[in-house]
Image (cartoon, rainbow, N blue to C red):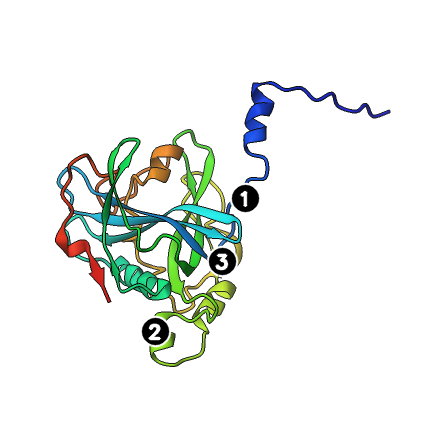
């Protein structure tokens, strides 16, 4: 005969209480429309001139954090990620995104407040990786940007073409497996075709040491030098202010 549980208040249940009613996270490859809840610049170190924009998305209560778009390489030259940033501004309907210094817990951070609170559409690919302790983890990479509601990419909007790209990605794109131990090459229900996505086969969007890597043991990628938080007093380059 089953016995009913006696409920106790202790440290463990107190932590559970803190999480009561908390929204879940995005967990699958796919297209998501939602609000940008944060947008923070990250910078290269050890002489690297690389820069990235790290955003968080809330899609009807489902959240994705540490979505990184690298737009300057270690040599300071623009990468394909600049196109993603430009598309993000178009989807968010903003003409300029001015950086702003904010005092963070680890020092000065550069934020992009113009993007915060704006609704955008992102196609996210789930990437499986091996943590430093050899356990499995996953992150998400931004593969395309689209307009909420219409689901059109900027190219489709500019050419007055049907909204086909995101639908094609939903059918074709699978999770990406970068784990260093065993397992199949890909995981998920979609195949690895890009469906015409110009960003999928690029590697420049994966510089190492985002806050996700710092917090979860994600191993460094080979594209660029590490990009942690900006150190206190780091000047912000003028060419990183965007206008359509």
Sequence-first disc among 3 and 2: 3
Residue 141 horizontal/vertical position (percent): 39, 52
Q: Nearer the viewer, mark 1 or mark 2?
A: 1
Measured Cα–Cα span from mark 1 to mark 3: 16 Å
130 left or right of 207 in image: right
The secondary structure type at the circle numbered 1 is loop
In the rendered image, residue 229, in percent from the top left (x then y), is placed at 26, 38
Helix, strand, or loop for circle 3?
Answer: strand
Q: Quadrant of residue 115?
A: bottom left
Other residues around mark 2 within 10 Å, as few (<14) / some (14–19) / many (≥20):
few
Dot 2 lies on which element? helix
Residue indicated by mark 1: 24
Q: Earlier in the sequence, mark 1 or mark 3?
A: 1
The answer to which of marks 1 and 2 sits earlier in the sequence is 1
Quadrant of image for the N terminus: top right
Farthest residue in the right direction? 1
Q: What's the distance in space between the residues labelled 1 and 2, CA to CA?
A: 32 Å
The residue where tag 3 is placed is: 30
Kindly report the distance in space between the C-alpha atoms of the residues bearing marks 3 and 2: 19 Å
Q: Alpha-carbon neighbours of circle 3 within 10 Å: few (<14), some, or many (≥20)? A: many
x then y, percent, for residue 138 = 45, 43
Say which residue label 2 marks: 155
230 to 39, vertically: above or below? above
């Amino acid at each position: 005969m089953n016995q009913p549980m006696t409920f106790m208040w202790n440290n463990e249940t107190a932590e559970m209480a803190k999480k009561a009613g908390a929204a879940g996270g995005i967990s699958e490859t796919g297209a998501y429309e939602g609000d940008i809840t944060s947008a923070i610049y990250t910078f290269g170190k050890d002489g690297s001139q690389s820069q990235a924009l790290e955003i968080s998305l809330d899609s009807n209560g489902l959240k994705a954090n540490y979505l990184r778009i690298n737009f300057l390489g270690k040599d300071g030259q623009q990468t394909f990620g600049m196109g993603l940033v430009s598309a993000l501004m178009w989807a968010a309907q903003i003409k300029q995104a001015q950086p702003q210094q904010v005092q963070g817990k680890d020092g000065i951070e550069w934020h992009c407040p113009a993007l915060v609170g704006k609704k955008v559409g992102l196609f996210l690919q789930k990437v499986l990786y091996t943590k430093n302790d050899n356990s499995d983890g996953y992150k998400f990479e931004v593969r395309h940007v689209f307009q909420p509601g219409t689901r059109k990419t900027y190219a489709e909007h500019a050419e007055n073409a049907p909204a086909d790209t995101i639908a094609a990605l939903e059918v074709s794109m699978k999770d990406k497996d970068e784990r260093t131990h065993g397992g199949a090459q890909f995981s998920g229900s979609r195949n690895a075709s890009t469906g015409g996505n110009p960003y999928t086969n690029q590697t420049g969007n994966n510089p190492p040491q985002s806050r996700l890597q710092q917090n979860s043991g994600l191993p460094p990628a080979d594209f660029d030098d590490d990009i942690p938080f900006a150190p206190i007093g780091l000047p912000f380059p003028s060419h990183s202010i965007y206008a359509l």
